[in-house]
């Protein structure tokens, strides 16, 4: 029975990491549309064979806004190397001409962020969302009933 419970806990954590947590992060972005630099028309992810995956991609083609998001369900805080790697990987998905787009980033973390991670953004516009902020942003409010419809 102990072995079964150990396997269940490991599977549950993996399931939360790959399915539940990214879904909650997408919903948070959906509900926070008024605080984003543009109104999201599409919220999804980008996976492809031979290219790095991006957990969240938020786009508004009309206002030329794009946000790339990383969802980390790790027990360790996001560090500077993870931030730099993500910023570099997301460049492959930048729309062209890049100068015409408002590009921002969102980092969602179960365990928070190191100070070095926040400094590693090289002045990019970033949102830092820990579990407390995620929970707060997912609470129902008046604005959630009047939000624009987007595709998920």
Image (tube, grey):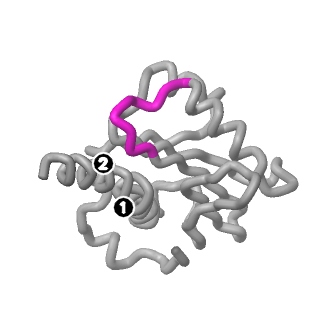
Where 59 sits versus 91, above or below?
below
Query: Mark 1 falls on what kind of element?
Result: helix
Crowding around mark 2 (Cα neighbors within 10 Å: few <14, some 14 to 19, many 20+) is few
Position above or below: 47 against 94: below
Q: Give percent across and percent down for residue 37.
A: 57, 54
Residue 16, picture quadrant: bottom left
Name the element at disc 2.
Answer: helix
Outermost residue toward the right in this view: 97
| Residue at image mark 1 | 20
Which mark, residue 138?
none
Task: Choose mark 2 or mark 1, whichever is in front.
Answer: 2
* Callout count: 2
The crowding category of the residue bearing disc 1, from other C-alpha atoms within 10 Å (few below 14, some 14 to 19, many at least 20), is: few
Relative depth, front residue between 56 and 96: 56
Q: Main secondary structure of the magenta part?
A: loop
Is 78 inside the magenta-drawn segment? yes
Going 82% across and 48% down the picture, which residue do you hit? 99
Residue visible at 65% across and 60% down in the picture: 47
Classify residue 25 as left or right of residue 89. left
Which residue lies at the image location 64% right of the left edge and 53% below the top edge?
Answer: 53
The residue identified by callout 2 is 10
Above or below residue 123? Residue 61 is below
Position of residue 36 relative to residue 152, above or below, is above
Q: Point out residue 64 in the picture as x, y percentages from the top left corner.
A: 72, 61
147 part of magenta stretch = no
What's the magenta region? 72-80
Residue at 38% across, 39% down:
74
Q: Which of the 4 quarters of the picture holds residue 144?
A: bottom left
Q: Nearer the viewer, residue 116 or 11?
A: 11
């Amino acid at each position: 029975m102990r072995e079964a419970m150990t396997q269940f806990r490991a599977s549950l954590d993996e399931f939360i990491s790959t399915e539940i947590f990214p879904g909650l992060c997408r919903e948070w972005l959906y509900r926070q549309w008024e605080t984003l630099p543009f109104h999201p028309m599409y919220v999804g992810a980008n996976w492809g064979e031979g290219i790095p995956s991006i957990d969240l991609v938020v786009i508004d083609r009309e206002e030329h806004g794009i946000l790339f998001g990383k969802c980390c369900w790790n027990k360790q805080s996001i560090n500077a190397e993870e931030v730099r790697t993500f910023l570099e990987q997301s460049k492959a998905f930048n729309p062209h001409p890049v100068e015409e787009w408002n590009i921002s980033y969102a980092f969602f973390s179960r365990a928070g962020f190191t100070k070095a991670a926040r400094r590693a953004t090289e002045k990019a516009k970033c949102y830092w969302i820990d579990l407390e902020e995620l929970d707060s942003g997912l609470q129902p409010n008046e604005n959630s009933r009047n939000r624009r419809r987007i595709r998920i």
